[in-house]
Image (tube, grey):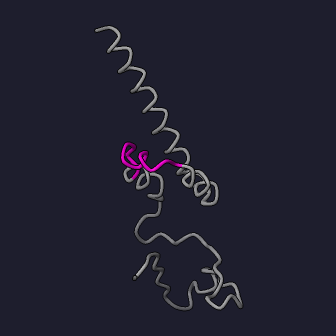
Amino acid sequence: MRLLLRILIVVLVVYGLLVAGLALAMRQPPATFGKIMARMPMPAFLILPFQSLWMNARAGGLQVGQEAPDFTLRTLDRSADVRLSSFRGSRPVVLVFGSYT
């Protein structure tokens, strides 16, 4: 019985460390996170709470009515950069992040 208890404790500690490591990886810049996820074995996605950790890590801290942080994006034809702040006060901006495929 003691052996089973020790094995269970070791498994729980290893699982906790894996979850903590994944949570820490999700808070890294996208390039670093991508490199980490590229090496993650497929069974890990079934065992670790990936979705709940992701939703927590990427929840953000903006409140309704608060100004969006400034950022710069390239146009589709890559001819210029556009800053969000350049539209402030002149016209509404709608930001859509996702795929319509």
Query: Residue reaching furthest left?
Result: 1
Q: Please, which residue is most extreme toward the front here?
A: 42
**Which residue is nearer to you in this view: 38 or 79?**
38
Q: Residue furthest top?
A: 2
Residue 30's quadrant in the figure? bottom right
Q: Give x and y (percent) for residue 40.
A: 52, 48
Between 36 and 73, the residue placed more toward the observer is 36
Left or right for 13, reference 34: left
Residue drawn at the location 37% of the way across and 43% of the way down: 47
The x and y percentages for residue 99 are: 43, 78
Q: Is residue 68 above or below residue 75?
A: above
Compared with 44, 74 (above or below) is below
Residue 84 position within the rendered picture, expressed as x and y whole percent measured from the top left = 60, 80
- How many marks overall? 0
Question: In the image, what residue occupies the spot 54% across and 44% down?
Answer: 24
Is 2 left, or right, of 22 in this rendering? left
Residue positioned 38% across, 20% down in the render: 9
| Quadrant of image for the N terminus | top left
Q: Is residue 26 magenta?
A: no
Magenta stretch, overall SS: helix
Q: To which quarter of the image does residue 98 belong?
A: bottom left
Relative horizontal placement of residue 58, taking residue 74 as reference (left or right): left
Q: Position of residue 72 (x, y in %)?
A: 65, 77
Q: Nearer the viewer, residue 89 or 76?
A: 76
As drawn, 26 above or below 4? below
Q: Nearer the viewer, residue 28 or 9?
A: 9
Q: Residue at x 47, y 63 (%)?
A: 62
Question: Is residue 46 rendered magenta in the image?
Answer: yes
- Image quadrant for the C terminus? bottom left
Magenta span: 40-50
